[in-house]
Image: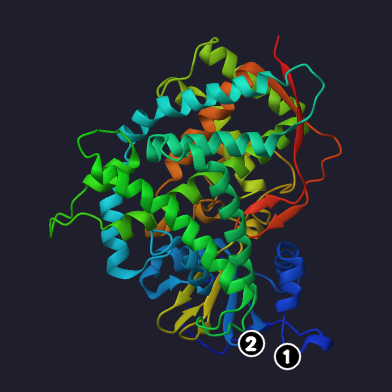
């Protein structure tokens, strides 16, 4: 094990050579075109810590679990969000994902009660009700030999769930608009992250004008919901929006402003449906490709639930289901990379890390490290059995991040996946198209590059 606290600073970083024709741009073009493969290849060449040459940015890559723990947990007070989150903030605002310091602490403290276990139990019924609607939709395709766009169906399902649990179904008539806005926003965020040469914000480039249109459309949707809810205070809704509107700061007695509510619900809305939809899609794909794992899972579901609807209690008895979900997110982590930035200079494994250095943590690379995972490119849910995980480093697997800034919605997302997978697999066998190629499209999230079609068969 490397000693991360070795304070000698004599070591030199492994430094990536710039391609001969791209000396000025450093490694940025490689990163744009190769993305995940870029990080996988450099891990093999240079190991778990190295610098990347990018103009106007200091970037270091970490992929050793102990060093990641040091950044996210042990010395987390010296690290803020990296430059990539500045671009995300343009669209999501100053919500829990992007905010910093005392403001973030206050918002986290205010929002945390809305995600406690008793609140999740209250949301369980919403999840089952929306999954029943999805099952009704899938029934139209069952045993017809007709292919269905599985990603689209799962998108609708997860959007309906977050809509009902967050807004009491108040954005039903705008879900298609929101999906289009989120997709376009994700592309613009990626372009900003990829480009180290940003013009001043006041210059009205075509991209900037389009960004402003997207932001205005998002604001129109979410501020309308907030204002409507404030005018209907006599109506009590057991949803996340009401919980966030009612919560008061213990010290000041203040509630969240409309701007704070907008930023938090937009963050929860976007993060709460896209990442789960992506994770569900990859899970169905992996189960379709591994018939023995699918059979083992459906046998467990049948034995434990005996044909009944899942409940918050009974679903906890589906131990193999949880292993399947964990292994799916190891293979295809929806958030495939995360970043931090040093506030003051630091030392990691004897390397001096200057102030303002961006730390890239490629979660996908860690999840596929042969030194940490045997046969990392195979789908083996059994590796997440409790006895198998005892000796694993906690940061060998971290799809929801870690430390104080662990994703606040992690338990919500896991419960949602458990409900959706259980209820759909009770009714159907889903076979993804044999022609589907699982190429990755790693933008902000790890989407499949190709449309995921599937055929639906009723279980006998």
Residue 320 in the image, given as x and y percentages of width and height:
58, 28
Q: Which residue is drawn at 61% across and 54% down?
A: 183
- Residue nearest the observer in this picture, 213 or 71: 213
Q: Mark 1 — residue?
A: 24
Coordinates of residue 423 in the picture (x, y in percent) = 56, 22
**Is residue 407 among what the camera can see?**
no
Determine which of the numbered discs, if any, sits on residue 369 in the image: none
Mark 1: give few (<14), some (14-19) or many (20+) Cα within 10 Å.
Answer: few
Residue at x 65% of width, y 83% of height? 54
The local secondary structure at tag 2 comes to loop
Residue 385 higher or lower than 315, as above or below: below
Where's the N terminus, which quadrant? bottom right
* Residue 196 visible to the viewer: yes
Q: What residue appears at the point 75 percent right and 76 percent down from the top-left corner?
A: 29
Q: Are marks 1 and 2 in contact (CB under 8 Å)?
A: yes
SS label for mark 1:
loop
Using the image, determine if residue 281 lies above or below residue 79: above
Of the 4 image quadrants, the one containing the C terminus is: top right
Relative placement, left or right, of 282 versus 113 is right
N-terminal-most mark, 1 or 2: 1
């Amino acid at each position: 094990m490397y000693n991360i606290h070795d304070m000698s600073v004599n070591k030199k970083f492994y430094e990536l050579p710039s391609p001969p024709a791209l000396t000025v741009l450093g490694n940025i073009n490689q990163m744009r075109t190769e993305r995940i493969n870029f990080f996988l290849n450099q891990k093999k060449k240079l190991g778990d810590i190295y610098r990347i040459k990018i103009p106007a940015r200091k970037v270091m890559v970490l992929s050793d679990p102990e060093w990641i723990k040091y950044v996210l947990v042990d010395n987390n007070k010296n690290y803020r969000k990296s430059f990539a989150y500045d671009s995300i903030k343009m669209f999501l605002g100053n919500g829990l994902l992007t905010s910093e310091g005392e403001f973030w602490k206050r918002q986290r403290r205010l929002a945390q009660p809305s995600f406690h276990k008793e609140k999740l139990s209250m949301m369980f019924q919403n999840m089952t009700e929306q999954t029943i609607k999805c099952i009704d939709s899938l029934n139209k395709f069952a045993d017809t030999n007709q292919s269905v766009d599985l990603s689209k169906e799962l998108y609708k399902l997860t959007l309906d769930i977050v809509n009902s649990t967050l807004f009491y179904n108040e954005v039903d008539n705008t879900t298609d608009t929101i999906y289009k806005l989120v997709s376009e926003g994700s592309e613009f965020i990626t372009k900003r992250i990829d480009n180290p040469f940003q013009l001043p914000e006041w210059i009205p480039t075509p991209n900037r004008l389009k960004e402003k249109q997207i932001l205005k459309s998002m604001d129109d949707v979410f501020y309308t919901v907030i204002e409507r809810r404030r005018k209907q205070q006599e109506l009590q809704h057991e949803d996340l929006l009401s919980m966030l509107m009612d919560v008061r700061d213990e010290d000041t007695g203040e509630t969240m402003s409309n701007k704070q509510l907008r930023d938090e619900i937009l963050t929860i809305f976007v993060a709460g449906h896209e990442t789960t939809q992506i994770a569900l899609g990859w899970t169905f794909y992996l189960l379709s490709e591994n018939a023995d794992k699918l059979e083992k899972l459906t046998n467990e579901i049948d034995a434990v639930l005996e044909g009944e609807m899942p409940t918050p209690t009974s679903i906890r008895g589906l131990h193999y289901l949880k292993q399947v979900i964990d292994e799916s997110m190891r293979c295809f982590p929806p958030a495939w990379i995360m970043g931090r930035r040093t506030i003051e200079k630091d030392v990691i494994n004897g390397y001096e890390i200057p102030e303002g250095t961006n730390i890239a943590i490629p979660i996908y690379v860690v999840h596929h490290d042969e030194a940490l995972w045997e046969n990392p490119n195979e789908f083996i849910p059994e590796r997440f059995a409790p006895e198998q995980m005892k000796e694993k480093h906690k940061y060998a697997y971290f799809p929801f991040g870690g430390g104080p800034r662990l994703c606040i919605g992690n338990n919500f997302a896991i419960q949602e996946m458990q409900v959706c997978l259980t209820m759909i697999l009770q009714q159907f066998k889903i076979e993804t198209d044999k022609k589907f190629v699982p190429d990755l499209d790693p933008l902000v999230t790890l989407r499949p590059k190709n449309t995921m079609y599937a055929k639906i068969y009723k279980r006998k």
